[in-house]
């Protein structure tokens, strides 16, 4: 059965003015929908019409089918990104807060590293907070690459493609990152992913089968 675009977990104007309704409608309704459509077409050709999105990513990687991999990975990354954001924001607490203090020194230091790595990232890609055997790190992936299959388990991600911020911040990626890091990251989502990192399951977050 084909994959279906997941709904945004908030209203399309919920993240404004940092991320406007126009950006979210285009990013979700056009870009993410496009990745889903191309993934479904690729899955059909690969004989994977009934596979999960994660299975399609893995198969495309194994077969060296880069277009299929890029579209499936982008479909996954965007589902993960929508859930990495929240108008409620908040701050890390519990085990995740303790791990951040241990591995970065403070939440502010982690935020500074996400900002700096996101600003310096060349061209398109993603910046992530990840966990490997309980240790936290900031990671970057380029273009359509993903942490969906790797040993580094993603906790949060921020989209660094220009389509994520150009309508609202023009070329100022730093301004977009500052706005996101200033209160739009869903630390509850990160904490749930941190707690589940060993079992690595994100049901319903990345794509829906229809
Ligand atoms: Fe994007």
Image: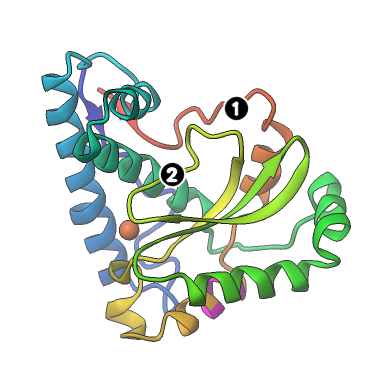
Q: Indicate which label's residue lies in the foreground, 1 or 2.
A: 2
Mark 2 neighbour density, 10 Å: few (under 14) some (14–19) many (20 or more): many
Quadrant assignment, res 22: bottom left
Q: Mark 2 points at which residue?
A: 146
Q: Mark 1 points at which residue?
A: 200
User: What residue range appears in magenta?
Assistant: 178-182
From mark 1 to mark 2, how far is it between C-alphas?
Answer: 14 Å
If the picture is divided into quarters, which one holds ligand 1? bottom left
- Residue at 76% of width from left, 57% of height from top? 92
Spot occupied by residue 169 in the image (x, y as percentages of width and height): 36, 84
- Residue at 45% of width from left, 77% of height from top? 18
Spot occupied by residue 138 in the image (x, y as percentages of width and height): 64, 57
- Residue at 56% of width from left, 70% of height from top? 117
Q: In this view, does 83 lie above or below 53?
A: below
Q: Is residue 122 left or right of residue 120?
A: left
Spot occupied by residue 26 in the image (x, y as percentages of width and height): 22, 62
């Amino acid at each position: 059965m084909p994959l279906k675009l997941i709904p945004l977990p908030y209203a399309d104007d919920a993240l404004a003015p940092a991320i406007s309704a126009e950006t979210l409608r285009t990013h979700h309704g056009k870009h993410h929908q496009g990745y889903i459509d191309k993934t479904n077409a690729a899955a059909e050709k690969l004989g994977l019409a009934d596979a999960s999105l994660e299975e399609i990513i893995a198969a495309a990687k194994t077969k060296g089918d880069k277009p299929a991999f890029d579209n499936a990975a982008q479909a996954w990354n965007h589902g993960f990104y929508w859930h990495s954001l929240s108008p409620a924001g908040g701050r890390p607490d519990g085990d995740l807060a303790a791990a951040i203090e241990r591995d970065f020194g403070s939440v502010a230091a982690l935020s500074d590293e996400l900002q700096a790595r996101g600003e310096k990232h060349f061209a398109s890609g993603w910046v992530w907070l990840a966990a490997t055997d309980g240790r936290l790190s900031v990671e970057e992936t380029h273009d359509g690459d993903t942490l969906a299959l790797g040993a580094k388990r993603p906790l949060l991600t921020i989209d660094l493609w220009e389509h994520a911020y150009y309508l609202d911040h023009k070329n100022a990626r730093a301004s977009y990152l500052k706005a996101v890091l200033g209160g739009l990251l869903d630390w509850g989502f990160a904490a749930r992913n941190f707690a589940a990192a060993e079992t690595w399951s994100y049901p319903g977050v990345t794509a829906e089968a229809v």
